Amino acid sequence: MSAQLAAYSTSTGEAFQFWVLGTVAVAGALATVFMKRAVHSALSLAGTMIILAIFYLANGAYFLGIVQIVVYTGAIMMLFLFVVMLVGVTAADSLKETIKGQRWLALLCGVGFGVLLLAGIGNASLSEFDGTGQANANGNVEGLATLIFTKYVFAFEITGALLITAAIGAMVLTHRERTERAKTQRELSEQRVREGKHVPPLPAPGVYARHNAVDIAGLLPDGTPSELTVSKTLRDRGQIRDVSAEALSDLKALEQRAEERLERTEIEPATFKREEASK
Amino acid sequence: MNPVNYLYLSALLFTIGATGVLIRRNAIVVFMCIELMLNACNLAFVTFSRMHGNLDGQIIAFFTMVVAAAEVVVGLAIIVSLFRSRHSASVDDASLMKL
């Protein structure tokens, strides 16, 4: 293993692993950028990060490889998914350009930057690879621990301060102080009676006999959806499913069938009115 | 295969992440692209560690991970509070300072 890591050229197995997983990593990164929904982006990024963890292991960074899986894909990406769920899964990115041609300019900048970076690496003389065999001789974790607690001990201490500051900062940012006492149920009911609107409970969501999901607005007698029936959170996120058009077309089909059964002819509303007017 | 290919892959991933930051409007996706850039840097650090035969590169990558964790915590808290006040996670909507 150590001889292999020290080699100037890698083994065939590592080369095969690099080309297969590297392709998947790049595909995952592209999917992160170009997927429309944030959840799909997050999942693609998690896949790319796991592949990077395998590359760390292949490069002799055993501790980092495991930490990458535990911390990045285990903690950070799940935090991302939490926030995506909080903000709303279906909230797709708007594809409207606010600055004209910004997308193409951004792509051009990206390609130019990439070409510069790759050309820079290509021009550097990077033929000497010492390999981590020597450094990992006493074990990778032991070697890292020695460095952290001797040469980098000050940076390590500062990191502790940074983590505490970040935790407190996150709490301060997301915490909301209540400026007034929460109303009791009795006060709320009294307020409803005083205001005189919606004294009974709010109408239930769903179209009976067809849909009873909470995100489907109940229909008023004229077939329009009633906003009151759906929870405010869903209304804010724009996650209401509207079935009024379906319900109206179903009703129309039902009426037509009933008319056919009763052998009545349909009366056009326009002609009906005219006849009435002529009378 | 020359191990320098890891550096090329790292540069490619960094470029994709940077392009994503420029293109995307959803704050969460922009943030994910930043994470992708940080990960690409870590891959370069690990490869440099292999190139020079010492563990300093891996230590730096380790510190990068710690800083990234702190950054994600604060950044996501900012996005959540932004979403609470604006009801949207789009970076275009946070334009109160614009003339």
Image (tube, coloured by chain):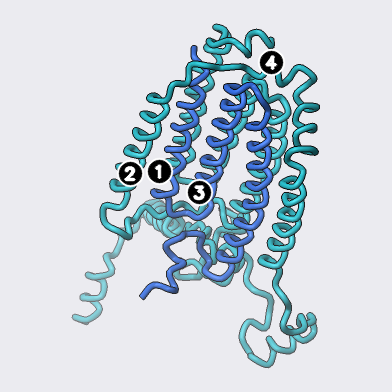
Chain that is coloured blue in the picture: B
Whole-percent x and y of residue A107? 33, 43
Left/right placement of residue A116 relative to residue A2 reads: left
SS label for mark 4: loop
Mark 1 or 3, which is nearer the eye?
Answer: 1
Q: Residue at x 49, y 21 (%)?
A: B4
- The three-letter amino acid code for the residue at tag 2 is Cys
- The three-letter amino acid code for the residue at tag 1 is Thr
Circle 4 residue: A133
Chain that is coloured cyan in the picture: A
Circle 3 residue: B29
Label 2 CA crowd tier, 10 Å (few <14, some 14–19, many 20+): some
- In front here: A223 or B7? B7
- The three-letter amino acid code for the residue at tag 3 is Val
Left/right placement of residue A98 relative to residue A92 reads: left
Q: Residue at x 54, y 31 (%)?
A: B44
Q: Residue at x 80, y 27 (%)?
A: A142
Whole-percent x and y of residue B70? 67, 51
Q: Is residue B9 above or below residue B1?
A: below
